[in-house]
């Protein structure tokens, strides 16, 4: 049995894993779920895929691996997408932990609220948090911009999983109303990521059927 | 120059790194900062330690590594604290990413608000978020409890960085009002972690001077 990605194709966290697999030439099968319809909270999903009720989950045979960045490391273990030196490996993980703590909960959540839920359908708590998450998201993008001034990649001298993890929600931050033009070093870095010969975009030409899909 | 941990001794994220170093027999020096006094937001700290204004930061010579879980991996690279097989390594990271995304922002933040800021000093946003974070924190502890039923450790058959990372804020969750007695498998696992011959507690007998301290 090959590798199966349990995903929602609109999710940047799922895209990270697909992009990593394409960079490595690894074939993936896909099982698509619609998070808007709570398809990852069914008893079957909770019992057999992820007790945490979240996607993405990478399946390898009878093993299931939640958490997007852990799945990227699993696929890329020993490859050129992970630095060969001890500090570089840890520094790559540093940016991946930072992405999940300081970037994704702000940049990705605002995108989800604005572009998928719709601003006029937010509840009171979401409405209260929106300006806070916008400010934290701008701070995250500004930190990335400062780090990238004079650097081509987040860690070392080539593209690593840190770039893939951070690219996923950064390049669609405009969907949430973030102005990417304010971060020129981020813009140049996104062009470098997208110019890689193995790059694939987040949007697929053929929409996946919800339920079970394949690429 | 040896390893230096820039820390606030009350922080579970800093304790993770110290506990990892003790398990490995690695000496650490300490530089203590008081986050309540914004000592990690000074121009000197931002320019020379971490542009993100956060601790912990692990320093090795002229290299600086923010993000607690990345620092633990750096110290433990190649050791018994990281599983030897590819899936086990990724599964360990899965729990460490989960800790930073679903556990720490709830369990640790509620502890900080209640035990350090004080509930009567919370601002309006914190007051609004407190019940939400309490509910998410209880969900995180419940997920841990289900995972630990029938297992001694989070991953594989021995203590790994996943256990260290999750122990740090779980064992002090009561400071934030969480009732650890509701999670018996978590309780037994905490006893196993604390019974390890190399274990050290979070609380130090001699309080550190703020500014520069050593253990």
Image (cartoon, coloured by chain):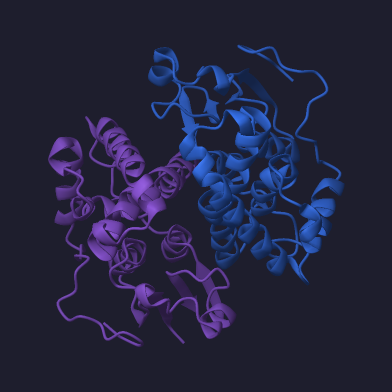
Chain colours: A purple, B blue
**Would residue A17 appear left or right of A97 to someone viewing this image?**
left
A101 vs A79, nearest the viewer: A101
The residue drawn where x is 31% and y is 86% is A213
B168 vs A194, nearest the viewer: B168
For residue B189, above or below residue B202: below
A132 vs B32, nearest the viewer: A132
Q: Percent from the top left, x then y, of residue A100?
A: 43, 50
Give the quarter of the image for residue B183: bottom right
For residue B38, above or below residue A50: above
For residue B20, above or below residue A17: above
| One can see residue B197 in this view | yes
Q: Percent from the top left, x then y, of residue A28?
A: 35, 78
Give the quarter of the image for residue A91: top left
| One can see residue B155 in this view | no
For residue B40, above or below residue A47: above
How many marks are shown on the rendered structure?
0
Q: Percent from the top left, x then y, of residue B152?
A: 78, 63
A182 vs B78, nearest the viewer: A182
**Would residue B44 appear left or right of B201 to someone viewing this image?**
left
Give the quarter of the image for residue A204: bottom left
In which quadrant of the rendered image does the C terminus of chain A lie? Answer: bottom left
Q: Percent from the top left, x then y, of residue A155?
A: 35, 41
The residue drawn where x is 86% and y is 44% is B197
């Amino acid at each position: 049995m090959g590798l199966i990605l349990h995903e929602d194709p609109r999710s940047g966290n799922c895209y990270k894993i697909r992009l990593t697999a394409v960079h490595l030439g690894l074939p993936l099968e896909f099982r698509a779920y619609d998070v808007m319809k709570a398809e990852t909270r069914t008893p079957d999903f909770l019992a057999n895929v992820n007790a945490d009720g979240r996607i993405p989950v990478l399946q390898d045979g009878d093993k299931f691996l939640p958490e997007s960045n852990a799945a990227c490391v699993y696929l890329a273990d020993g490859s050129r997408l992970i630095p060969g030196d001890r500090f570089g490996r840890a520094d790559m993980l540093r940016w991946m932990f930072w992405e999940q703590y300081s970037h994704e909960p702000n940049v990705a959540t605002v995108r989800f609220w604005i572009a998928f839920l719709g601003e006029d359908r937010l509840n009171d708590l979401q409405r209260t948090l929106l300006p806070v998450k916008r400010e934290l998201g701008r701070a995250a993008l500004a930190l990335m911009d400062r780090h990238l001034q004079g650097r081509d990649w987040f860690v070392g001298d080539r593209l690593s999983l840190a770039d893939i993890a951070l690219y996923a929600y950064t390049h669609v931050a405009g969907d949430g109303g973030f102005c990417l033009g304010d971060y020129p070093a981020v813009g140049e870095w996104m062009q470098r990521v997208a110019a890689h010969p193995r790059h694939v975009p987040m949007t697929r030409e053929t929409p996946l059927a919800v339920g079970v899909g394949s690429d």
